[in-house]
Image: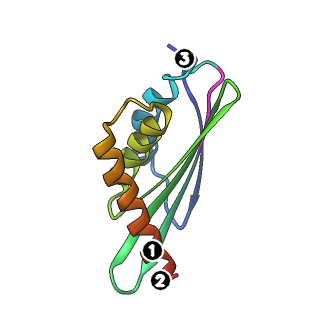
Amino acid sequence: MLSPKINTKVINVELTSERQKQIISNLAPVTRLINGGRGAVCDVVIRKIHRSWGGAIYSILVRLTADGETYYTVAHERHFGRAVSEAADRLRRSMSKTYYTEAQQIRRLQKTAHEKYFVELFV
């Protein structure tokens, strides 16, 4: 079994071995969806954003490059593990058009538009 190449960069977060294992266990199966993981490079940027009104939020940006194709995703959650699994799920969704039904895709697009609206409001 090939070990995926996952590059990790952190901002305002301590990258413990447990967190590194969570990243690998969630993103390694996604990297293997393209050509069995051969030549796949996954770049992960993790940032902890401190909000005065609601605590901290983990923001995870993922870029997966393989076979000349590049996929991006961003996930924001209050818990690190949830943020990583949400990023992996969104990356899998963007790689496969048949992964979710159209109704689920419409709900996801509405949620994305809602998030962008509030991010623009508070940033």
Left or right: 70, with 58 as reference point: right
Answer yes or no: is residue 118 visible.
yes
- SS at badge 3: loop
Residue that mark 1 sits on: 117
Q: Are marks 1 and 3 in contact (CB under 8 Å)?
A: no
Residue that mark 2 sits on: 121
Residue 67: percent from left, percent from top? 67, 23
- SS at badge 2: helix
Q: Quadrant of residue 54?
A: bottom left
The amino acid pointed to by label 2 is Leu
Task: Please give the name of the residue rendered at 61% of the width and 18% of the height, measured from the top-left corner.
Answer: 38
The amino acid pointed to by label 3 is Leu
Q: Are marks 1 and 2 in contact (CB under 8 Å)?
A: yes
- Asked if residue 27 is among those painted magenta in the image, a careful observer would answer no
Answer yes or no: is residue 81 visible.
no
Neighbour tally class for label 3: few under 14, some 14-19, many 20 plus, Cα within 10 Å = few
Which residues make up the magenta segment? 39-43
Neighbour tally class for label 1: few under 14, some 14-19, many 20 plus, Cα within 10 Å = few
Task: Please give the name of the residue rendered at 38% of the width and 41% of the height, measured from the top-left corner.
Answer: 89
Task: Please give the name of the residue rendered at 46% of the width and 43% of the height, measured from the top-left corner.
Answer: 20
Task: Please give the name of the residue rendered at 50% of the width and 63% of the height, measured from the top-left corner.
Answer: 13
Residue that mark 3 sits on: 2
Mark 1 to mark 2: distance in Å?
Answer: 6 Å
Mark 1 to mark 3: distance in Å?
Answer: 41 Å
Mark 2 to mark 3: distance in Å?
Answer: 44 Å
